[in-house]
Image (cartoon, grey):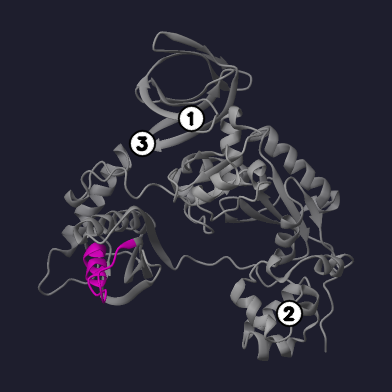
Amino acid sequence: MIQRVNEKISVITVYNHIKNSILPVQVRWHGRIYHIKKLGYHHKVRMGRTMLHIFSVCDDSLALKLQFNSDTLEWMLEEVSDGLTD
Amino acid sequence: MDLPINHNAPTIMHIDLDSCFATIEQQANPLLRGKPLVVAAYATPNGCVLSPSIEVKRFGVKTGMSVRDARLLCKGVIVRTPDPPKYRDVHMKFRAIFNDYSPNVSPRSIDEAIIDFTGTPYLKRGLVEIGNEIKKRMKQEIGEWIWCSIGIAPNRFLAKLGAGLKKPDGMVVITHENLMSIYAKIKLKDLHGINTKNEARLNINGIFTPTQFFKASENTLRSLVFKGIMGYYWYLRLRGWEIDAVDWDRKSFGQEYSLGKQTDDPEEISRILMKLCEKMGRRLRSAGSAAQGIHVACLYKDMTHWHRGKKVEQQLYTTPELYRKAQWLLNQQPERKVIRKLAVSCFDLMASKTPQMELFDVAVDKRRQVSDAMDKINDRYGEFVITPAIMLGMNDLVLDRIAFGNVKGIEELY
């Protein structure tokens, strides 16, 4: 099942200067902490001149679609999905 | 004299992402991997399946089916709606990989591209080795769940045929040596460009298999089957000679929308038409073009259709200019029926420049300046930040979609 969320969240990220990559490793949403196990895909989307970074990540049972706004430096949780049928 | 099969070494590689949208969703969400999944235009029962995953294809689910039918064939199928920006990003990444191997890369659609290796040093390494390297790089640089099928042949047509023969994750090389044995194993409709109509055309001339198609003389294909130059093109194509190395210039801009809620309400249809004209106008103007023709098409609920196109004297540039003419055409429908799909396109493109001054309408240039200013605001703050009032409250209508085929202009989004 997939659920649209669109809520601001707190995120801890790790930046690797050798690979020049950034990875969200921990997400706090509604008081609960999710430890990110895997980055599925990272892509960029333009909203006007603002660049949004979209990180599709997951822990063991939940997939999260995170959006980082490079203008406002805000993190949003766009949607969550458990990878099961509706 | 009969033309022999092309004996030259293969130089064309056709690369096709397997189950493109579904595979990309599985890449992005590892919890979906190995599960039956379809990406459908809408998640509703009537939504059209755009891309079934490799797992669900085993149940007989195919592109074009309804979600309802997909659920009947595979009870636990997961349905997702498309995420076009993600698919475009993958497209740009695989194009970047291909550009490392040849300057002649032609994207054919969001999930297909052709690399012409003619004259490149990579030919010496062998295209099979290059193909394996490309597969490896796609997994490393895009994602480990990304699969592609590769066809290698002397021309584009056979390379595409090869890419479709062994899926998923296959690689087929077609040369003069194995061409006939491949034709013996496939059906006419497996050949790209042979649809139901062309198949019937061949059948009524006694051609029922690709081998018979290959053996037909040029005269038969030209004068009897296709009744024109197309027959000659097929004659060349089937023998491995290149006839499809043409990159067509853009001739039109168009938008279409399958109505989630089908309606015959003229007000609602006008609002949708305006949004289609705005999206089309944005693309037209960003390409620095104006149009002198407009076309509107409707597919009705009863599956009948109607369309009308018209050339106009004035240049169409701003959204209101396009919309006014499109609405004028739409009003010429012989009867109002419930519309299922609405499409608008503009053609007869030309470079947009200040039009000749009108004797009575002196505000043409001012209207263009206003339109350009609105475009700049939308470029800066995001699409549809400023819109015509008729489009208010339409955020969820006419969603971003990936067109089948043409990927012209995809770079403009990045």
- Give the distance between the C-alpha atoms of the residues marked 3 and 2, in whole angstroms: 50 Å
**Where does residue B165 sit, x and y in percent of width and height?**
76, 57
Disc 3 chain ID = A
In the displayed structure, would residue B1 be above or below residue B250? below
Q: Residue at x 77, y 73 (%)?
A: B210
Can residue B18 be seen?
Answer: no
Q: Residue at x 70, y 60 (%)?
A: B160
Badge 2: how crowded within 10 Å, few (<14), some, or many (20+)?
many
Whether labels 1 and 3 share one chain? yes
Which residue corresponds to mark 1?
A1
In the image, B332 versus A8, the foreground residue is: B332
**Where does residue B251 sit, x and y in percent of width and height?**
44, 68
Q: Amino acid at mark 1?
A: Met
Badge 1: how crowded within 10 Å, few (<14), some, or many (20+)?
few
Disc 1 or 3, which lies upstream in sequence? 1
Whether pointer 3 and pointer 2 mark residues with C-beta atoms closer than 8 Å, the reply is: no
Badge 3: how crowded within 10 Å, few (<14), some, or many (20+)?
few
Q: Nearer the viewer, mark 1 or mark 3?
A: 1
